[in-house]
Amino acid sequence: MSEKSFVMLKPDAVSRRLVGKILARFEEKGLQIVAVKLLQISKNLAEEHYGEHKDKPFFNSLIEYITSAPSLALVIKGDDVISVIRKIVGATNPKEADLGTIRGDFAMDMGRNIIHASDSLESAKREITLFFKENEVIDYDISDNLWIYE
Ligand SMILES: Nc1ncnc2c1ncn2[C@@H]1O[C@H](COP(=O)(O)OP(=O)(O)OP(=O)(O)O)[C@@H](O)[C@H]1O
Ligand SMILES: [Mg+2]
């Protein structure tokens, strides 16, 4: 069943001009972008988004990093989207992430792992609502537009 996930290209992905390469991986896999927003995340929004980690030792540096420069927020739709995207993204620690995953190919540092993806449908709903208004998510059916390529 087609579901939605929240994905965010973190500041180093945008600063290193990797946006196109990363989005191509999701599109080529067959997933569909249904919302996009470039934004510099405020401290409040960052603390809310990563609220589950507020007692961890790395929390302050995580918030500092995520608010340091613009990020690209996305909603991506597809079948089994949570697990498919987490597979494409790779392990949290980029040094351990498999080659062929985004973190495995583009990152070296746990604190600079270039991308976030929701870990469950519940987190996805919460995160999408945090970053997007309802009318900013365009729930189109891609098959309606196939005529463009005929
Ligand atoms: N031990 C750690 N040291 C430093 N930073 C960490 C550590 N563990 C997690 N982080 C940072 O906090 C973020 C959130 O950690 P989480 O456990 O939710 O991993 P994740 O779900 O793979 O990543 P994300 O939520 O960003 O998609 C990680 O992406 C990473 O940048
Ligand atoms: Mg997480």
Image: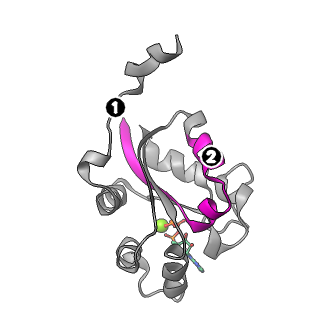
Marked residue nearer the N-terminal end (1 or 2) = 2
Q: List x then y, in percent, for residue 91.
A: 62, 62
Q: Is residue 86 left or right of residue 108?
A: left
Q: Is mark 1 within 8 Å of ligand 1?
A: no
Q: List x then y, in percent, for residue 100.
A: 72, 48
Is residue 23 found inside the magenta-colored segment of the image?
yes
> Residue at label 1?
140
Question: Which residue is at a point 66% across and 46% down the rendered structure image?
Answer: 21
- Please identify the quadrant where the N terminus is shown: top left
Residue 111, located in which quarter of the rendered image?
bottom right
Residue 26, located in which quarter of the rendered image?
top right
Asked if residue 79 can be seen in this view, the reply is no
Amino acid type, label 1: Tyr
> Residue at label 2?
20
- Tag 1 secondary structure: loop
- Tag 2 secondary structure: helix
- 3D distance between C-alphas at marks 1 and 2: 22 Å
Asked if residue 8 can be seen in this view, the reply is yes
For the view shown, which residue lies furthest in the top direction? 150
Residue 97, located in which quarter of the rendered image?
bottom right
Question: Which residue is at a point 36% across and 27% down the rendered structure image?
Answer: 141
Residues in magenta?
A: 1-26
Question: Which residue is at a point 62% across and 46% down the rendered structure image?
Answer: 20
Image height of 68 relative to 144, above or below:
below
For disc 1, the neighbor class at 10 Å (few under 14, some 14 to 19, many from 20) is few
Q: Is mark 2 within 8 Å of ligand 1?
A: no
For disc 2, the neighbor class at 10 Å (few under 14, some 14 to 19, many from 20) is few
Q: Is residue 26 left or right of residue 46?
A: right
Split into quadrants, the picture shows ligand 1 in the one at bottom right
Is residue 141 found inside the magenta-colored segment of the image?
no
